[in-house]
Structure formats: structure tokens, C-alpha cells
Amino acid sequence: MANKNKKRETQNDADALGMSSTEKILRRIHELYEKGLCADDAEGGTIGLLEIAHDPLLNVQGVWKPRKKVNVMIVGNHSAGKSSFINWYVGESVQTTGVAIETRGFTYVTSGRKRETLKGDATFAFYDHIGGLREFKGVEENVFTEISTSKDRNFACVDFVDTPGLVDGEMEYPFDVVESIAWLADHVDLILCFFDPIGQALCKRTMTAVERLNEKHAEKLAYYMSKADQVEKEHDRQRVLIQITQNLAGRIKNSHAFKLPTIYLPRDDLAVPIPNAIEEVCEDVDKAIRLTVQKNLTTMKDDCAKIVKAIDARGEEDARRKKDNAARTIKGWAFMFAGWLVLSLLAYVATLETFALRPVAVAMRVHALPRLSEDEFPVARAVMTGLLPTEVAEGEVAAKRWMGVENGGLYAMAWLSVAYVTLQVMKRKAWRGREARLTKREWKKLEGYRAYAIEVSAVREELYKEYFKQLHEGDGY
Ligand SMILES: Nc1nc2c(ncn2[C@@H]2O[C@H](COP(=O)(O)OP(=O)(O)O)[C@@H](O)[C@H]2O)c(=O)[nH]1
Ligand SMILES: [Mg+2]
């Protein structure tokens, strides 16, 4: 119940903050992975799909927290207008721009409640999925986050990754820039590649980076000729376009479908209008958002199914263990009883052997037997007479024969001892082999998980319907 109220609260929060439906859906999905279910001893729903999947009881592989925002990385040569584009999209001068070559590394530009700049450590804490970037020497202290309060365009659903401008020659990077861009490419949804007509668009490093990104992420890449307003004459622009296209052709896979729209930051003072596809860039971002929402909704459905399946499998496994354990217990008992039988036999033979020892036998005959009168202790007398070898009476060495074999008693004792030890070992092995069963508490926990996964599946259906409804109504991106 507390859980339900909690959910309603977050929903209201979202409305109060004036979020778009898409943003709400992305947030909600993220939230269901992070929290939702109440732990036995915690209030407020601290367990989400992620923790459930990673519970050692289930250990479901391949469940990751979906990103709350769409990540858009912008690459290109130095001064291609990457930072300026981000500022334009956000509607705020978040990133410094200019002609000076700066060595600043990667900057995440994200929306938040307060204008703030975070350094490396805080950035890695904020974006835990990029922890692997730290492996690249020198990157850590060159990663930043700029938080802006802007809600322009669809910025609320986007994280931009501004990358170091690529240049050739003397420029020293404090880290392997191409490799770290290639690494980050695995963790973004869209890569915008900017080539500007007058800078070092075709520098070797940019070409290497594009080639590298194209190997693995061709479908994520979109290319643009930026700052197109700097080349006013149409035929000059065509020449530059052809030059860039020719240079790229050999390096990219799907070059037949290659497009290089011209873009520039909107301005009114142009003498001759130059085609500006900057809205196409926004449309590319929107498309990435739509894809991410759909992907996240699908992933969540699959993950819930995976969890329910893992719980079923755990139940089946427990039933099998129960059956196996019962069989092992019975086997153990059988070995135990057999052991007792062998032990009594051993005791019997040992007694016979003891009585057969000459000094013992003589002492018994001379001292013990006469004391047992026929009337008072008939049974004891009979047993002792039966046990004592008759030969002793004639003064011979006590019989060493047993069941007709020389030293038979000793052999029998040795074999019986071996049999006893073996049976003990087998009993232990049977019992030790019993596997741990689920405790009542664990069962309860798993049932809770199942209920949550089913509940999340239902919420997902709702989100799915909501998303497509607003897509039709035109509110969605
Ligand atoms: N004419 C023109 N100049 C631009 C445009 N975009 C950026 N600039 C200028 O180009 C310079 C470099 O831009 P910046 O965003 O810092 O490039 P970055 O190195 O790729 O981040 C700055 O002086 C910007 O004002 C554009 O669309 N048209
Ligand atoms: Mg820049």
C-alpha cells in the first residue's frame, strides 16, 4: 500500500515539474529499475528490477539500468561548432566557444534543477555507466558535467557529450583521444559528426576517428557540414561538400546512403539564403529519443520476463533438491544401519577372540565359571561355557581357529573394521551431498520479486499505451 502511494507521489511530482510525457516515461522506467519494491526492513521501496536481477538467489545475467536520457555525442575537428551547437540547442551559453584550441576533454551537458559544473569524480558518480573510461590514462581529470536548468527543445530528455576538438600536428592531448571517443561511442545513442568548411575538417585525426566509429556504430552516425554560412558562394560549398564526401567515401561502410546536409546557427543577416538543415539535427535527436523510449520499454518487458523465468527455475531447482535430498537421507540411513550391524558382528568376534586367549580362558575357567552356579545364573553360565574354547581345559594353547580358518578371528575383525569404516564414509558422503534448500524467508522474498515483476509488466503496458497515444496526438517527439 505504502508502495502504491509512493508511486502516485512521483507521478504527481512529474506533473508538477511540467515534464513532457516522454520525459516522464523515461524517468519512470529508470525508477522501476532503481527502486519500487520495499525490502523487509526498509521503507520507501528501495529494491528495483536491477537489484532483483542481481540477487544471488536469481543471478539473472544481462540486466542493465536503462538510461534516463538519450545520450548524443558530438565529434568533429576543433572549431567545427560543436560547443556552439549545444549552446544553441540548450538556449544557454553552457559551453565556452571560440577559436582558441583548448584541451578540455569530455563534457556532459545535462538538464537539472540548478546551474552547476561537476568535475571528474562527481561526473563519474553521476554517470556510473562510463566508469570504464577511467581506464584511459589522463582522461579522469578531463571529464566534466555542465548542468543547465534549460528546458528548451527536448533538452530535458537529452545528455550531450561534447568531445575534444580534433586537430593534427603539434597538439598534445593528455590522453588517447581517438580511443576514448571510440570507447564512449558504445555508451551513446546518437553520434553527430560535424565537418566545417574552413577548419581542419579533413585532418587525419578526424578521419581516423570517423573511420573507427564507423566500424561499429555506422547506424548511430549522422554527418553534417557545419558553419555552412561561412562559405557564401553556392559553388564553393558544393566544392567543399564534394571534397569531404570523397575523403569519407573510402572510410565508411554505407557510403551510397551517405548524406551531408549543410547546417549553421540561424542568423537573419544573410544576403543570399543558404540551405540550413539544423532542424534536421533536432529531428535526428528526436528520432533517437523515440528509439530509446521504445527500446527501453521493450527491454523492460524482456527483463521482467527473464526475472519471472529465473524465479520459476529456482522453484524447480528447489523441488529437485528436495527429491534428491530425500533420496540421500534414505541412502544415508541404510549405510548407518548396515554399519551398526557390522559393528555388532565385530564386537561378537572380538569377544570370541578375547575369550580364546589362553590367560583369559584359563582365568575364566578357574575363577569365574565355578562362581556361577547352575541354579542362580543358568544363562550366564551357558553363554560363558559356550564362548570358552574347550581345548583350554586340556591345557592347550587357546584355539586360534575360527570358523575353520587359521587366525580366522583376526582376519574377520580386520575385514569387519574395513567394512565399518567404508560404510561410515559412504553414509557421510550421502548426507553431506544434500543441497541447501530455500528458506521460508527466501521463498517469501522470491514471491515478492515475482509480484513486483508482474506489477512492473502491467505498468509497462500502461506506459506503452500512454506513449503511443501521445505520439498520435503529436505531443511525443
Ligand atoms: N559562422 C558561423 N560561426 C560559427 C557557427 N557555429 C560556431 N561558430 C563559431 O565557430 C567558433 C568555434 O565554435 P565552437 O563551438 O567553439 O567549436 P568547437 O571547437 O567545435 O566546440 C566560434 O567562434 C563560434 O562562434 C556557425 O554556425 N556559423
Ligand atoms: Mg568546443
Image: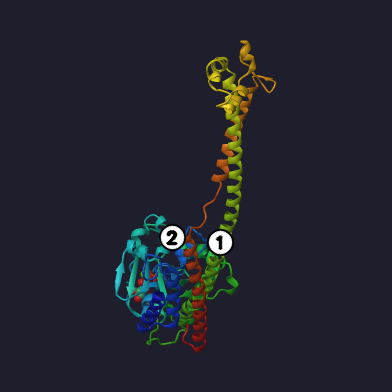
Element type at marker 1?
helix
Residue 303 in the image: above or below residue 383 = below
Q: Is 354 or 158 nearer to us in this picture?
A: 354
Q: Residue furthest right?
A: 404
| Rendering coords of residue 32 (x, y %) | 44, 72
Q: Residues within 10 Å of mark 2 (few under 14, many from 20)?
A: many
Is residue 316 rendered to the left or right of residue 82? right
Q: Is 473 or 354 nearer to us in this picture?
A: 354
**The disc label shown at residue 315, or none:** 1
Is residue 410 rendered to the left or right of residue 102? right
Marks 2 & 1, CB-CB < 8 Å contact: no
| Rendering coords of residue 3 (x, y %) | 41, 74
Is residue 222 rendered to the left or right of residue 133? right
Report which quarter residue 257 is drawn in. Answer: bottom right
Q: Amino acid at mark 1?
A: Gly
Is residue 22 something one can see in this rendering? yes
Is residue 204 something one can see in this rendering? no
Q: Residue furthest top?
A: 395
Q: Residue at x 33, y 64 (%)?
A: 122
Query: Which quadrant: the N terminus?
Result: bottom left
Disc 2 CB within 8 Å of nearest ligand 2 atom: no
Residue 194 in the image: above or below residue 467 = above
Image quadrant, ligand 1: bottom left
Residue 435 in the image: above or below residue 381 = below
Q: Amino acid at mark 2?
A: Ser
**The disc label shown at residue 118, or none:** none
Q: Which residue is mark 2?
A: 180
Mark 2 or mark 1, earlier in chain: 2
